[in-house]
Amino acid sequence: MVRGGHLGTEEFPHYHTQHTQRKEIMSNPFELRFKLLEMAQSYLQEQQQRNQDFVFNVWDLAKEQGNASMKLWKELQPESYTIDDIKKKASELYEFVEKK
């Protein structure tokens, strides 16, 4: 039974599809830029979530020790990322793409 559709790909039925999809994604510079922006935003969102988790851990500890206050809560809040932060991270990611 030939599943791959191409001679030599019978054992890997999804190989041709995956290869073609990757080629299409990287064939258009605008799509590459969009993907880099998505990756940068995702990275910053994950970093923001880790920071927020840290804040809650510190806040819980401060409550246990009786040191919780609105001043501390405000000081612990991480800064939100900006559009410029996303562009900067996307540029960092693009540097990897440019290297040969």
Image (spheres, rainbow, N blue to C red):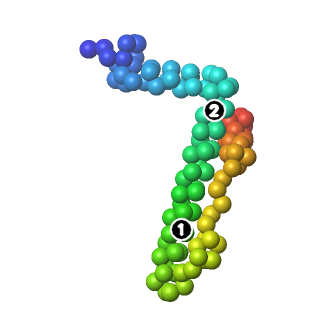
In the image, what residue type sits under mark 1? Answer: Phe
Q: Kindly identify the residue that appears in the image at 39 percent across and 24 percent down.
A: 14
Q: Secondary structure at mark 1?
A: helix
Q: Is residue 22 visible?
A: yes
Q: Residues within 10 Å of mark 2 (few under 14, many from 20)?
A: few
Secondary structure type for disc 2: helix
Q: Residue at x 63, y 37 (%)?
A: 36
Numbered-mark total: 2
Quarter holding residue 32: top right
On the rendered structure, is 73 left or right of 88?
A: left
Between 3 and 26, the one nearer to me in the picture? 26
Please tell me which residue is depicted at 57% across the width and 80% down the height of the picture: 69
Of residues 44 and 9, which is closer to you in this image? 44
Q: Which mark is residue 8?
A: none
The answer to whether 61 is drawn above or below residue 7 in the figure is below
Residue beneath label 1, please? 54
